[in-house]
Image (spheres, grey):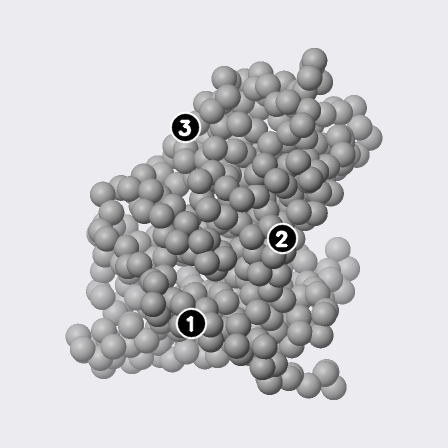
């Protein structure tokens, strides 16, 4: 028998969630229709600055650095309240969720003072320069080189899939400082790259949604001063470990559960109104989404209980990621069935966009095959 799930919230956690809910009710800005992605990002900066002014962004950061020192349970509640309000996500997500916690863990005091405040206010947007054409799931095979020069490093290589690089002031970059290290994980360093430095060439990649959120980033002898090295030279793999732990962290499933509950409620209404619910295939698909979301909710409650006890989410987070992927892709397909549209030929409309986006779910943050590998090895203990 496993340990019982404890669903009771502490009064201070309830108070935390309710004060955020009340703040959102009074301050939520509804986005206008955007002309393009640049317009959306510029509005997103303003919205994030509004949140930051009342310390309602980066709540998991320590109070001394502009956060609220929120506990993991409070972070989960914050994410749920945020999603329930249907507020647009903060624009500087890479900065808030990945770079901030990484600098808090591995940065110098000077780096924290210099970079952290402008992450929360969205004055400086960050991107993550990790993936390369030949280094994604197997990130340790990255080949971008950082050669030591007077006062710093010169970085040369090619990154890909870099979300929001075209809007970023800074990029957290993994590069090889010791190409002769015996193991691929050794000899990598984490560097803060100025995205406007000479030698940085950003080329947006248009996705099938029609937007260009990703980019290829070419780095040609880009100078990075020594004070922009994060952590110890050659130990960037440890720094990257912190970043990736936050990427696959606990924030995401709580938010996504509420977001998808809202989608399903909307879809059900639409199916009822346009008669699609009379089709047993559609009705079954909606019922399946309802069940999938119920299961995700139970997993989230279990995670919350573990976090409340000060335990780590563990390899089960791979299971949650995989389940979420299946759920979001299935729900998006149901969305297309309800609206009777073909997402590829009609790219317009929220469901078509949602369907197109849902294809990325089985890749971003670790592919489904990689999650299955983790489940097989670390949960089921199957032989390799
Ligand atoms: C929406 C989105 C946003 C992203 N944003 C960023 C970003 O801002 N910065 C950044 O650095 N990266 C970003 N990425 C990149 C992302 O981290 C990689 O796409 C991901 O790690 C997979 O790497 P890959 O695309 O190189 O695929 P590969 O690793 O080449 O995989 C190709 C195929 O092989 C399979 N495979 C690989 N290894 C194994 C294995 N051991 N066992 C079984 N199957 C395997 C994979 O599952 C996949 O099907 C983003 C990706 C997406 C989709």
Q: Nearer the viewer, residue 123 or 134?
A: 123
> Which numbered circle lies on residue 64?
2
- Label 3: how many residues lie within 10 Å, few (<14), some (14-19) or many (20+)? some
Q: Residue at x 60, y 85 (%)?
A: 8
Q: Residue at x 53, y 27 (%)?
A: 194
The correct choice, above or below, for 70 with respect to 243 in the image is below
Q: Nearer the viewer, residue 3 or 102?
A: 102
Q: Residue 184, percent across and down?
A: 74, 34
Q: Residue 21, percent across and down?
A: 42, 71
Give the mark nearer the N terminus: 2 vs 1. 1
Q: Is residue 86 visible to the viewer in this orientation of the structure?
A: no
- The quadrant the N terminus occupies is bottom right
Q: Which residue is mark 1?
A: 21
Contact flag, marks 2 and 1 (Cβ < 8 Å): no
Regarding mark 2 in the picture, which secondary structure is present there? Answer: helix
Regarding mark 1 in the picture, which secondary structure is present there? Answer: helix
Give the mark nearer the N terminus: 2 vs 3. 2
Relative to 26, 225 lies left or right: right
Q: CA distance from mark 2 to mark 1?
A: 23 Å
Q: Nearer the viewer, residue 5 or 232?
A: 232
The answer to whether mark 2 is within 8 Å of ligand 1 is no
Tag nearer the camera, 3 or 1: 1
Q: Which residue is mark 3?
A: 203
- The quadrant the C terminus occupies is bottom right
Tag nearer the camera, 2 or 3: 2
Contact flag, marks 2 and 3 (Cβ < 8 Å): no
């Amino acid at each position: 028998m496993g340990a019982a799930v404890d669903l009771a919230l502490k009064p201070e956690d309830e108070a935390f969630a309710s004060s955020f809910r009340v703040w959102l009710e009074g301050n939520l800005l509804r986005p206008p229709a955007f002309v393009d992605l640049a317009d959306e990002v510029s509005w997103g900066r303003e919205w994030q600055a509004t949140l930051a002014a009342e310390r309602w962004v980066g709540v998991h950061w320590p109070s001394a650095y502009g956060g609220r020192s929120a506990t993991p349970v409070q972070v989960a509640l914050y994410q749920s309240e945020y999603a329930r309000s249907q507020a647009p996500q903060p624009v500087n997500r890479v900065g808030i969720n990945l770079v901030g916690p990484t600098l808090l863990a591995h940065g110098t005091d000077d780096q924290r003072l210099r970079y952290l405040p402008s992450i929360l206010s969205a004055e400086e947007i960050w991107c993550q320069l990790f993936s390369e054409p030949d280094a994604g799931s197997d990130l340790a095979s990255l080949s971008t080189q950082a050669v030591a020069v007077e006062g710093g490093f010169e970085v040369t290589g090619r990154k890909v899939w870099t979300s929001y690089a075209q809007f970023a002031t800074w990029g957290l970059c993994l590069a090889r400082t010791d190409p002769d290290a015996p193991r691929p994980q050794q000899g990598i360093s984490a560097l803060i790259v100025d995205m406007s430095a000479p030698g940085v060439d950003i080329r947006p990649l248009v996705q099938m949604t029609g937007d260009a959120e990703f980019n290829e980033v070419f780095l040609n002898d880009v100078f990075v001063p020594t004070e922009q090295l994060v952590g110890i030279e050659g130990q960037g793999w440890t720094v990257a470990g912190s970043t990736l732990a936050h990427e696959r962290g606990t924030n995401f499933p709580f938010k996504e559960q509420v977001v998808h509950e809202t989608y399903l409620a909307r879809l059900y209404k639409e199916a009822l109104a346009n008669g699609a619910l009379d089709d047993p295939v559609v009705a079954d698909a909606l019922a399946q989404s309802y069940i999938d979301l119920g299961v995700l909710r139970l997993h989230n409650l279990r995670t919350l209980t573990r976090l409340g006890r000060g335990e780590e989410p563990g390899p089960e987070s791979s299971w949650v990621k995989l389940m979420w992927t299946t759920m979001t892709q299935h729900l998006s397909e149901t969305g297309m069935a309800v609206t009777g549209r073909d997402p590829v030929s009609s790219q317009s409309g929220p469901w078509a966009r949602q369907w197109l986006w849902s294809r990325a779910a089985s890749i971003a943050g670790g592919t489904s095959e990689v999650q299955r590998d983790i489940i097989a090895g670390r949960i089921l203990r199957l032989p390799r």
